[in-house]
Image: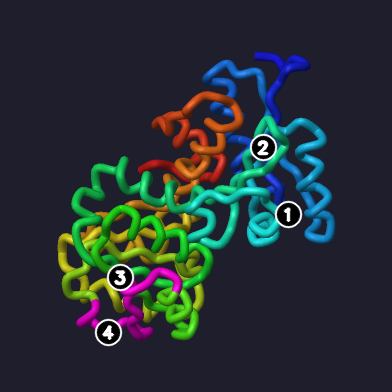
Amino acid sequence: MGLTGAARLAGVMGWPVAHSLSPRLHGLWLDRYGIDGAYVPLAVHPDRFAEAFRGLVALGFRGANVTIPHKEQAFALCDRLTGRARAIGAVNTLVIGEDGLVTGDNTDAFGFIENLRTDAQATGAFEGPALVLGAGGASRAVVHGLLAEGVPEVRLANRTRARSETLAEVFGQCVRVVDWPVPHAACADVRLAVNTTSLGLGGGDMAPLLDVLPALPAEALVTDIVYKPRITPFLLAARARGHRIVDGLGMLLHQARPGFEAWFGTAPEVTADIRAAILSDLGETSA
């Protein structure tokens, strides 16, 4: 449908932002549900973020997504924060209330868990220990999501051990730091192995990452939060060894759902055709 003067407005703030798939995804949903609204890319230099942040309120926006490099700055500027945003320490979704106050949320953990919940390959993934590779911002969201889902123990490994230890201190005794490269003994009963490192893109020293795979139980699920390429070298190697795998595209798609519902009043679905359209934009296929 066409826009009217009553259109609801949202967008994505980043620097750069031209690569973002969010306008395409939200645009597909707006068309599907016949909503009078728009979701636009907002390229905001870090030096101008604070004024742009308040400008959303002045312009009547319902909210926005926040991407690199603004997530921590947005966290500091929000009037209110959800519990999961506080736990993760960063904001990726802004919701502007009728009172003009901005609530900061983080939907990355939601997206990660929903990607596994809705994939038939992921049965039983939350029923035992999880191994998380990497200790950056994405890892923090993944760990939060796993613990909230009731995973009994998260084993955390990172090339710089101090970063793992810092993260473990945040989440408490259910998170155990293990060495990098990961000792095979730490993999023996793992039900889910998650790569959050940039090694998922390929390149760099892949050996410590790939060395995890032979030590995993045959029934362990392997996933990677990288979605381009859809089947990363880590997933390709895991599949070759007979492991069930789940790619990272669903995390991107599902993390967008709570924001869309808050801004436009409709709970969107991640359907096969929506996924196929985004895959096409990425030059990927579902095969």
Task: Give the SS element for disc 1.
Answer: loop
Amino acid carrying label 4: it is Pro
| Distance between mark 3 and mark 4 Cα atoms | 19 Å
Q: Kindly indicate the quadrant of the structure image that contains residue 7.
A: top right
Q: Position of 22 compared to 173: left or right? A: right
Tell me the SS state at disc 3: loop
Name the residue that disc number 1 marks. Answer: 16
Q: For the residues carrying marks 3 and 4, which lies nearer the camera in this image?
A: 3
Label whose residue precedes the other's in the sequence (3 or 4)? 3
180 to 77, vertically: above or below? below
Q: The disc labelled 2 sits on which kind of residue?
A: Ile
Residue 174 is tagged as 3
Using a 10 Å C-alpha cutoff, classify the residue at mark 3 as few (fewer than 14 neighbours), some (14 to 19) or many (20 or more): some
For disc 2, the neighbor class at 10 Å (few under 14, some 14 to 19, many from 20) is: many
**Pointer 4 with pointer 1, Cβ within 8 A:** no
Give the number of the mark in front: 1 or 2.
2
Drawn side of residue 110 relative to residue 173, left or right:
right
The kind of residue tagged 3 is: Cys
Disc assigned to residue 96:
2
Q: Which residues are magenta?
A: 170-186
Q: Which mark is residue 183?
A: 4
